Image (spheres, rainbow, N blue to C red):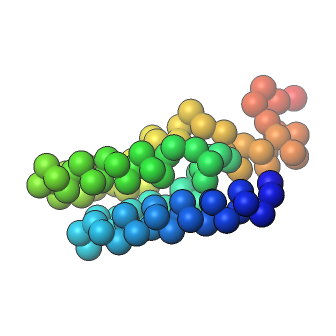
Amino acid sequence: MGIQDIIEGKKQWRAHMARVKALPPDYQIVYKEMQRYLFKVGPVDLLGGSLLPGLLDFFEEGVVAGKGVLELIGDDVAAFCDDLVKDSRTYADLYQESIGNGPGTAGK
């Protein structure tokens, strides 16, 4: 990764966060909590993938439709996040594999 890639990544992240700040306050709070949760348990390709931008698109559509944020995702934010990443490889998976407890090694 070169310096230009880093600079471009920062520009994209700032533009992304500007979109988050344009959301209503309740959406911002939930988005930031989801982002924090996903950074802790989320997929390895979280920053390079489409999960966060897709989530932001989903929230923006909810705002336009006049829905409350919890109408979109339900009351259990963590469960919603877990469902988003259920088929993705996470850092927890990498750790389990590194200590020999990866998929297919249970009971061996």
Residue 19 in view, yes or no: yes
Q: In percent of the image, x 61 and y 66: which residue is there?
A: 10
User: Percent position (x, y) of residue 11?
Assistant: 56, 65
Between residue 26 and residue 8, name the one nearer to us.
8
Image side of residue 59 versus residue 84, left or right: left
Residue 82 in view, yes or no: no
Image side of residue 47 versus residue 14, left or right: right
Please identify the residue farthest to the left as the structure is shown: 66
Between residue 61 and residue 107, name the one nearer to us.
61
Place residue 21 in its image quadrant. bottom left
Q: How many circles with numbers are drawn on the protein?
A: 0
Query: Quick check: 102 above or below 17?
Result: above
Quarter of the figure with the N terminus:
bottom right
Q: In percent of the image, x 78 and y 63: which residue is there?
A: 3
Please identify the residue farthest to the front as the structure is shown: 4
User: Percent position (x, y) of residue 33?
Assistant: 43, 66
